[in-house]
Amino acid sequence: MAQPVLFFALAGGDWSGAERLRDMRAQTPEYHLDFWRPSLSRPFPPGRRDPRILSYSFMHSAGLFETLSYSMVHLSAPDGSIAHSSLIMPRFARFPFMGLDDLQIGATETSPAHRGRGLAVRAIDETIATLGHSGRTFWYLTEDANTASIAVIRKAGFSLVGRGKKVPRFGLTPLGYYAITEHS
């Protein structure tokens, strides 16, 4: 049985991470920030070959997202390896609870060698600072049992909006969507 999903959100206008971001940039200057956007020559972001990302790149190219904000933020270590990455998803059929200009931060990964340095929170703050924090809500979904992910998103200032689940569509879980079933 699938884990319950927690829905966290932050209204962009309520973001108060500018000072935290400044401090994190000063504490982790060796990590280089980049935003990847899909193209025909770069359908995958650096360091990621997940087939789901290719399907999202196709969806982006086909105009299936509500906006053109599909991207990935990543922080590179001094050796050039990807230390952290997070996918930025606009609203589409899988996230019907989102507003038109809202963005969901997900598929978050921090390399084990780089954990404990605040890179996930920095990536969230970099995303909000770069993609605009006024007039949109940022969402973050995680399984109820993922305590590390919950700690990160709370540190980034997001609030729990509710609990829910992935609902199958046409009887197929891979085609499903996320639904909030209990508001906090």
Image: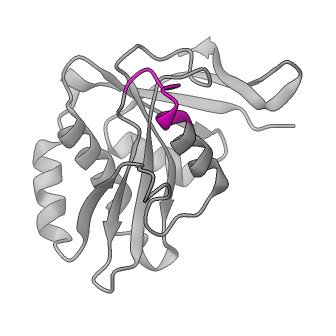
Q: Position of residue 177 (x, y in %)?
A: 68, 23
Q: Position of residue 139 (x, y in %)?
A: 43, 30
Drawn side of residue 132 relative to residue 150, left or right:
left
Nearest the eye: 57 or 81: 57
Compared to residue 144, the image places residue 38 above or below, namely: below
Task: Name the residue rendered at 31%, 36% in the picture.
Answer: 157
Q: Position of residue 38 (x, y in %)?
A: 42, 49
Compared to residue 36, the image places residue 172 above or below, namely: above
Nearest the eye: 21 or 40: 40
**Residue lying farthest front?**
40
Compared to residue 175, the image places residue 70 above or below, namely: below
Which image quarter: residue 84?
A: bottom left
Which image quarter: residue 33?
A: bottom left
Q: Main secondary structure of the magenta part?
A: loop
**Residue lying farthest bottom?**
79
Task: Name the residue rendered at 71%, 32% in the picture.
Answer: 4
Counting every numbered tag in the picture gives 0
The quarter of the image holding the N terminus is top right
Residues in magenta? 59-67
Nearest the eye: 36 or 144: 36
- 63 within the magenta span: yes
